[in-house]
Image: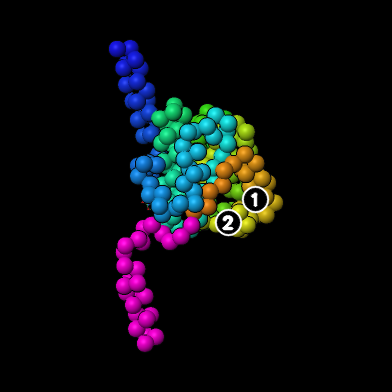
Amino acid sequence: MLDREVSARSASGAQLRIRAAGFPARKTLEDFDFDAQPAVRQQIAALASGAFLTQARNIVLLGPPGTGKTHIATGLAVRACQAGHRVLFATATDWVTRLTDAHRQGHLPRELARLRRYGLIIIDEVGYLPFEQDAANLFFQLVSSRYEHASLILTSNLPFSGWGGVFGDQAVAAAMIDRIVHHADVLTMKGASYRLRGRGIDSLPSIRNTSETEQ
Ligand code: ADP
Ligand code: MG
């Protein structure tokens, strides 16, 4: 009886944490078709235990658009919510907005301290938009404040060598990557976009037109 109450309470706690995390879509590891990404199957199976969270390790998901980076980040984060960790998901651009606002109001240290109480933060889509130098510095502070204390999952369509361009400063990018990767698993997704699978991409108008003009 008591056991059942406790498990019901922890299940509703997990649901609350999942709702509070702000995921862009509900995705689970169970929904993921690992045949599309066989190279990362073992790595993800190992991470699914959640041991990375108690060790404050990070995860970096790299790869082209549509290869499942956000899906895997969400799936791992849902597991974290179920294991009792507080989670916050946002795009890199959203994080910059949030940190810039806190900085302008003179609350940055307080905001960083508040965020440290989250066991997992996801920074999605590093690389789609470049940052101002100020934003890069704020980002660096977020990464530093969590270093060896709480986990981050980052996703990017760019290899690390391209991050200097995103952060507008090679030195800031290098110092940040150094801290992120020191205790991290780096997963590289490959191949074509899952979004375009089975869409008959060679019959898309633009491609058909190209081949027609070639004929
Ligand atoms: P990325 O973040 O790498 O651009 P997403 O994770 O957003 O890609 O994936 C794009 C869409 O395709 C999502 O709806 C996602 O659930 C789905 N998807 C991608 N890869 C897989 C996969 N291997 N198995 C199942 N669904 C996938
Ligand atoms: Mg994505």
**Residue hosting label 2:** 159
Which label's residue is closer to the chain start, 1 or 2?
2
Please tell me which residue is depicted at 36% across the width and 58% down the height of the picture: 195
Three-letter residue code for mark 1: Ala
Number of marks in the image?
2
Residue 143 lies in quadrant? top right
Residue at x 32% of width, y 16% of height: 5
The local secondary structure at tag 2 comes to loop
Question: Which residue lies most toward the left here?
Answer: 1
Residue 189, horizontal then vertical, whole percent? 49, 53
The structure residue drawn at horizontal position 42% and vertical position 31%, both measured from the top left corner, is 81
Q: Position of residue 116 (x, y in %)?
A: 55, 31
Nearest the viewer among 119 and 110 is 119
Query: Residues in magenta?
Result: 190-215
Whether label 1 touches label 2, CB < 8 Å: no
Splitting the image into 4 quarters, where does residue 144 fall?
top right
